[in-house]
Image (tube, grey):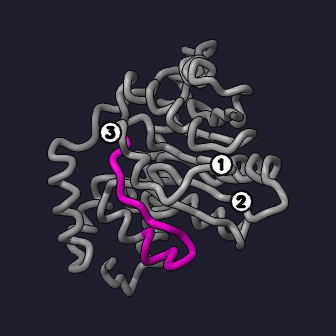
Amino acid sequence: MSPYISNVAAWQESWDRQQEAYLPDREHRFAAMLDAVDAVRGDTPPRLLDLAGGTGTISLRALHRFPDAEVTLVDLDPALLALAAASLGDRATIVTADLSRPDWAEALPHRGYDAVLTATALHWLPADRLSALYPELRDLLRPGGLFVNADHMPDDGLPELTKRLLARAEEHRSARHAAGAVLSWSQWWHQAEQDPTLAPLVRQRHAIYPTGHSPEWTPPVSWHLTALRDAGFTEVGTLWRGAADAAVAALR
């Protein structure tokens, strides 16, 4: 049973503000993802998998857009999963699984998803594991089902502009952090460690990730498009782009 978190709405807001400092166009990518789901959904309530869903950011927005959706959220982080469970209640199925393991999907309640959605998460996986994960995700989709991955994916053709865009974003973000406008990633986790309910879960998180996540690996968008084609998807392309980030989409 998930712990009771009385101030879960405040924690969700704090998480959103912290993330938006790194991703100013965060809501734009979510809207594009859900527009794509709307385009491929059938006449029945959509069955959605929120992959590496964290606090439930995508799930909450998907349920607002599609109130009758059948949502499964999978993640490994106990603190973020507790926030997701407290926010979503019985509107979603919460699953603990490690995407770095090839047997992770055995924990899912079913297959045949209309869409698998993920954002700013899979860059923690090394290249060989992400290459293997893409065909695993294809197999979880119904025929014609949709996969969308929104993450740090620079455009190969704009190396100098991308460098300047990233430097500009870092300058703005540093100024906001220095002024106390928002919490940084490390500050957010420090705050969570001070909360009596979240503190033991943060300690569990440290045990799972003793040195943090794997080093961030951000290949260009072309790498993802090639890997998705190699995974056997029938249509592959770029659904959305913002500065050095993009959302790639693929249909089974």
Give yes or no for residue 239 being in the magenta stretch: no
In this rendering, would 204 be left or right of 88? left
- Visible in this render: residue 24? yes
For this rendering, which residue is in front, 65 or 41?
41
Residue 96 at what x, y percent from top left? Answer: 36, 58
In this rendering, would 222 be left or right of 101? right
Residue 65 at what x, y percent from top left? Answer: 73, 66
For this rendering, which residue is in front, 48 or 106?
106
Mark closest to the chain's N terminus, 2 or 1: 2
Residue 9 at what x, y percent from top left? Answer: 48, 78
Residue shown at the point (16%, 62%) measured from the top left: 203
Q: Callout 2 environment at 10 Å: few (<14), some (14 to 19), or many (20+)?
A: many
In this rendering, would 212 be left or right of 156? left
- The kind of residue tagged 3 is Arg
Residue shown at the point (38%, 61%) measured from the top left: 180
* Location of residue 8 (image quadrant): bottom left
The quadrant of the rendering that contains the N terminus is bottom left
Give yes or no for residue 96 being in the magenta stretch: yes
Q: Is residue 248 above or below residue 28?
A: above
Q: Callout 3 environment at 10 Å: few (<14), some (14 to 19), or many (20+)?
A: few
Q: Is residue 51 above or below residue 136?
A: below
Circles 2 and 1 in contact, beta carbons < 8 Å: yes
Q: Which mark is residue 115?
A: 1
Q: Which mark is residue 52?
A: none
Residue shown at the point (44%, 38%) measured from the top left: 122
Magenta residues span: 84-101
For this rendering, which residue is in front, 127 or 161?
127
**Pointer 3 residue:** 101
- The kind of residue tagged 2 is Pro
Mark closest to the chain's N terminus, 3 or 2: 2
Q: What SS does tag 1 mark?
A: strand
C-alpha span from label 3 to label 2: 27 Å
